[in-house]
Amino acid sequence: METIRLFYEKKGIAKYLSHLDIMRCFTRAVKITGYKAWYTEGFNPHLYLMFASPLSLGFESNYEVVDLRLDESSDLNDFVSRMNMALPDGIHVNSASKAVMSYKDVGYSSWRILINVDDAVTVKKTILEYVDQKEILISRSSKRGVVRTEDIKQYIRKISIECIDSTVIIYADFTTNTSVSLNPQVFMENFWVYSEMKNIPLVKITRDALLDNKGNLFK
């Protein structure tokens, strides 16, 4: 038995698939490949699938990671090819390898956030002022309804902004681990409150990479 790590992208219409839908897609695709995969034991056995920091609904990604176990030595190139023939539109496996890092090593996600505005230069300046604050406070509610204040400044590793005509492109590395994950939509919603600008709909949010705790590409 060997653990295989798949690196895949989720784009287009596939961004509206929930995490449960994605699990079903991969389970079905693995069955279609003909390769013998390992299933959990017990009353309700299911295909072993372990995802690194599952993506939020509505977000696209160029770099998603999932582990599975095969009961036989496999030709990874052939396995990837068969998986892509079985997966739905918008989900594409780019490569496969044996796992190098533990999921505990995931530290950050690299995001690309696109918005269209009337005055891109002013918005860029205001975002940089927003990030430059000593602290960025937001209110979060627990499952029990307890509201607490949290400083999300500590979860921003780095940020840069590019303006192309009326489009503002935000490149940001946000904390992503087993205990906390800064959602880019939360970051932007709080920015609109801070700036007192009209809440402008996001054009697209894309995760470009998963990084380890040192900021290197997660593999």
Image (cartoon, helix red, strand yellow):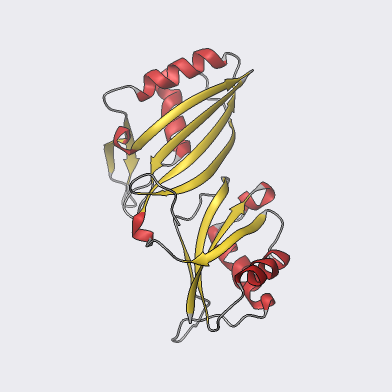
Q: Is residue 29 above or below residue 73?
A: above
Q: Residue at x 61, y 52 (%)?
A: 10
Q: Nearer the viewer, residue 171 or 76?
A: 76
Q: Residue at x 31, y 32 (%)?
A: 153
Where residue 89 appears, as percent x and y from the top left, is: 72, 56
Q: Nearer the viewer, residue 36 or 100?
A: 100
166 on left or right of 178 = right
Q: Residue at x 26, y 24 (%)?
A: 134
Where residue 1 appears, as percent x and y from the top left, is: 48, 82
Where residue 52 appears, as percent x and y from the top left, is: 45, 58
124 on left or right of 134 = right
54 on left or right of 117 = left
Q: Is residue 162 above or below residue 202?
A: above
Corner quadrant of residue 29: bottom right
Q: Residue at x 48, y 77 (%)?
A: 2
> How many discs appear?
0
Where residue 136 appears, as percent x and y from the top left, is: 31, 28
Q: Is residue 143 above or below residue 206?
A: below
Work out which quarter of the rendered image holds the C terminus and state it.
Answer: bottom left
